Amino acid sequence: GENVEQHPSTLSVQEGDSAVIKCTYSDSASNYFPWYKQELGKRPQLIIDIRSNVGEKKDQRIAVTLNKTAKHFSLHITETQPEDSAVYFCAASKGTGANNLFFGTGTRLTVIP
Amino acid sequence: DVKVTQSSRYLVKRTGEKVFLECVQDMDHENMFWYRQDPGLGLRLIYFSYDVKMKEKGDIPEGYSVSREKKERFSLILESASTNQTSMYLCASSDSSANTQYFGPGTRLTVL
């Protein structure tokens, strides 16, 4: 089955700096890579996703890059703000059947004001 | 707006009790999922269902069962709760034509 590894497990940045979270996956058939944000005490929510036919996708201050050859993808947050503090999960899916998502173990991001 | 609800936010049970966790979604999604979330381990899939009365084991099905009698409802059952099942349980749903999963608010279960 698919194995998704995520690093780092914790990340602290100063407000205004950039944050990068990296994930690797094992199954070359995976073609969908979402990122979820989970604020303290709340449910995970999708913030951005990318499909294997695209190398990069941006949405305001967040971007995701995908390297299919190396089987890794990354989340980039620029101009970080305190409200970006949360746990971020990456995931991978082959997009077949029930579209199961295989999640990484999460990164706790803390933005220091 | 997709709405996924779970029957309880907090639940305390005793070892050996039978526990039911309920999840309801209102978007007519075919797929529903149960995860448990533990610190440092991320979200681990327990069971999923892609249709009424259909179920498939996820990565950690031992000690759990599920029921999906209606499309909108997916129940997780702990036949005999044990202390190592103390965890946060998250339900999710998705449409079969899309990959995005929508999560419920979670149930924090404590087994004493």
Image (cartoon, rainbow, N blue to C red):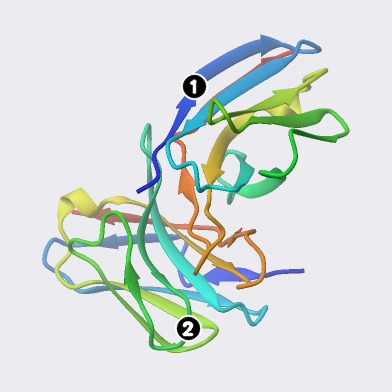
Residue A20, disc: none
What secondary structure is found at the residue carrying circle 2? loop
Q: Residues within 10 Å of mark 1 (few under 14, many from 20)?
A: some
Q: Residue at x 55, y 58 (%)?
A: B105
Question: How far across and how far down the image is residue A40, in percent?
Answer: 57, 39
Q: Residue at x 72, y 24 (%)?
A: A76
Q: Quadrant of residue B68?
A: bottom left
Vertical placement of A111 versus B67: above or below? above
How many marks overall?
2
Q: Amino acid at mark 2?
A: Asp
A54 or B77, which lies in front? A54
Chain for numbered disc 2 = B
Q: Which residue is mark 2?
A: B51
- Left or right: residue B36 versus residue A60 is left
Question: How far across and how far down the image is residue B66, in percent?
Answer: 32, 76
Q: Which residue is mark 1?
A: A7
Check the image and name the residue furthest to the left.
B16
Q: Residues within 10 Å of mark 2 (few under 14, many from 20)?
A: some
Q: Amino acid at mark 1?
A: His
What secondary structure is found at the residue carrying circle 1? strand
Q: Quadrant of residue B30?
A: bottom right
Vertical placement of B75 versus A68: above or below? below
Vertical placement of A11 versus A53: above or below? above
Label 1, label 2: how far apart the Cα atoms are:
35 Å
Question: How far across and how far down the image is residue A81, in percent?
Answer: 78, 22
Q: Residue at x 56, y 68 (%)?
A: B93
B73 or B94, which lies in front? B94
Chain for numbered disc 1 = A
Check the image and name the residue furthest to the front.
A69
